[in-house]
């Protein structure tokens, strides 16, 4: 009974390593080949899905992701590429979870703000213009922004002084969250 349940694993082990043992360790060249294949497949999957949703070619998206913009330092460029590849490495699982919640996921860079972000948008708003889609996004960002340290004014926002910080945060326009938990809009008190 157990051996029949392990038969697919044995076949996979035989295929990948030349050994029928299901828990055979990969040699370094085999592990490198399997990892490289996965990274290429994940990148292709991400670029194909995004090119379909954004009506762009995969080549154009690849160029956008890999071109260093003029005002970006080499260090920041490397960080952006690394975090994009970290996202792409987990993309199949992230996108599966997003699909369960009827969303799609995207990786974004913010060169002027020295940061990156992952954006989740509902699948049913993909046909809308970006300005309309933004209202439905949930963004997990890490970039530079002004963090107000002053008192709360009549409009409900904090006022100067402010500090520039590069912190992780969440933006969700539908919930009126912007740079949460660092910046919050407080409800006006009825007087």
Image: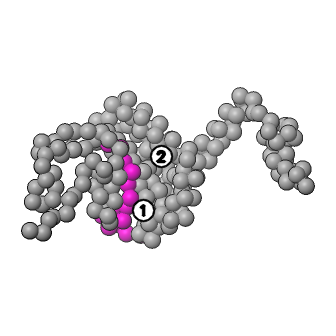
Q: Which mark is residue 121?
A: 1
Asked if residue 139 lies in the magenta stretch, the reply is yes
Q: Nearer the viewer, residue 69 or 23?
A: 23
Please tell me whether residue 119 belongs to the stretch shown in magenta. no
Q: Element under label 1?
A: strand
Foreground residue, 91 or 161?
161
Region of the chain picked out in magenta, as a range: 127-143
Q: Residue 110: horizontal and vertical position, in percent?
A: 33, 45
Q: Position of residue 111 (x, y in %)?
A: 32, 41
Q: Secondary structure at mark 2?
A: helix
Residue beneath the point at 21% across and 44% down:
146
Nearest to the observer: residue 92 or residue 97? 97
Judging by the rendered image, the residue that carries numbered circle 2 is 62
Percent x, y for residue 72? 32, 35
Q: Residue at x 37, y 69 (%)?
A: 128
Q: Quadrant of residue 188?
A: bottom left
Label disc, if present, on residue 33 of the rendered structure: none
């Amino acid at each position: 009974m157990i051996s029949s349940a392990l038969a697919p694993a044995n076949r996979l082990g035989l295929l990948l390593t030349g050994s029928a043992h299901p828990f055979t360790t990969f040699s370094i060249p085999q592990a490198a080949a399997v990892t490289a294949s996965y990274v290429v497949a994940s990148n292709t999957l991400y670029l194909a899905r995004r090119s379909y949703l954004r009506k762009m070619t995969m080549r154009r998206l690849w160029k956008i992701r890999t071109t260093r913009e003029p005002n970006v330092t080499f260090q920041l460029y490397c960080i952006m590429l690394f975090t994009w590849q970290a996202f792409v490495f987990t993309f199949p699982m992230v996108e599966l979870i997003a699909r369960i919640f009827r969303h799609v996921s995207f990786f974004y860079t913010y060169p002027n703000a020295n940061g990156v972000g992952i954006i989740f948008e509902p699948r049913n708003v993909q046909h809308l213009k970006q300005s309309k889609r933004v209202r439905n996004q949930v963004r997990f960002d890490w970039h530079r922004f002004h963090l107000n340290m002053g008192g709360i004014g009549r409009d409900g926002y904090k006022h100067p002084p402010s500090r520039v910080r590069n912190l992780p945060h969440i933006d969700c326009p539908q919930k009126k969250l912007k740079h949460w938990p660092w910046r919050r809009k407080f409800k006006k008190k009825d007087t």
